[in-house]
Image (cartoon, helix red, strand yellow):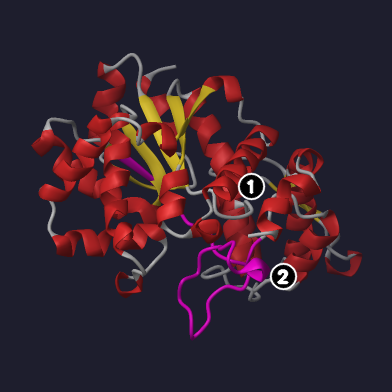
Amino acid sequence: MDVEERLKLISKLPVEEVITVSELRELLERKDKVIAYDGFEPSGMAHLAAGLMRAQKIMDLQQAGIKFKILIADWHAWINNKMGGDLEKIRKAGEYLIKVWESLGVDRKKVELVWASQLVDDSDYWKTVIEVGKHSTLKRMMRAITIMGRKEGELSDAAQLFYPAMQVADIFHLNVDICQLGMDQRKANMLAREVGPKIGFWKPVVVSHHLIMGLQGPSRMDMDLKMSKSKPDSAIFVHDSPDEIRAKLRKAHCPEKEVKNNPIMEYFKYIIFRGDEKEIKIERPDKFGGEITVSSYEELEGLYKQGKIHPLDLKNSLAEILIKMLEPCRKRIKESDLAVFKSA
């Protein structure tokens, strides 16, 4: 596979931004063994973004010949007071996440799983954390707190100030060339690019993916549109039953003929088509033309804008596609795996 094909796979949807494409190309030309990573706080049940979309993107990078490391950020979750700050529950939640990704196609033998609790045993790790802090202002660290899913004024304890510096240290102690995380983690990755060369490390390439919208879409009170496990009605979880998926999608925000801020269209774009051509069947009542086959997201968008596909038909079709895609996860994840969240 040539460099341009590898670039295309790495940049494939849901990727939204690459910093920078020229650096990524040079990296692929120069290094035989390129390493990428993503980090996850084990803090709740996996929805489409954390489960299915993550698995899809890992497999893209593996196909492009990239070694992928997954950091199970148990200490980060502890600092962020997830799972009631209970490290034992956090670890169980991490094991659950691993099962989710495996069930959705990630070959555990081809990824390297690292727990943050392994990294923190190394005194050199903490040396890097301190060096990152010494080369950053307090104001810069406070701005980066949003990577924790919190606003600047929402810090509850002093330990949380360590979080951004730890995330930067993770990158260098995992020996990562590419940071492949969500757009919400951009501030930490940019801090790594800025600080890395100053403390004897390198400038990692940042490949950031889109954050898919919650089912409820936008509201006047809350413009944070991303799917969130803390808002169960806004999320499809990867082990939801077929009836749950159908019911959630029927209630989802999906304005007729409108694509902007339409979560159903987003899921077709970033999860189903992902820039590829594939045949998707949309069931419609016979009086409205019957079943229709579309072969690209652009075709689907055009038909929807013209009113040739009704929101309910779009929702019903998406439900059946997701039910089939998530079937392996439903079979793998049992009630016993979810017990940790019910007791948190």
Residue 89 is inside the magenta segment: no
255 to 147, vertically: above or below = below
Q: Is residue 269 left or right of residue 232?
A: left
For the point 54% across and 64% down, the residue is 213
Q: Is residue 248 visible?
A: yes
Q: Is residue 265 left or right of residue 13?
A: right
- The residue that appears at 65% across and 42% down in the rendered structure is 96
Determine which residue is flagged by label 1: 272
Residue at the spot of label 2: 311
Q: Residue at x 41, y 49 (%)?
A: 76
Q: Residue at x 80, y 61 (%)?
A: 244
- Mark 1: which amino acid? Ile
Q: Amino acid at mark 2?
A: Pro
Regarding mark 2 in the picture, which secondary structure is present there?
helix
Question: Could you say which is closer to the camera, residue 23 or residue 190?
Answer: 190
Quadrant in the picture for residue 32 = top left
Q: In the rendered image, which quarter contains the C terminus?
A: bottom right
Q: CA distance from mark 1 to mark 2?
A: 17 Å
From the viewer's perspective, tell me whether residue 69 is left or right of residue 253. Answer: left
* Residue 193 badge: none
Q: Is residue 310 visible?
A: no
Magenta part of the chain? 206-235
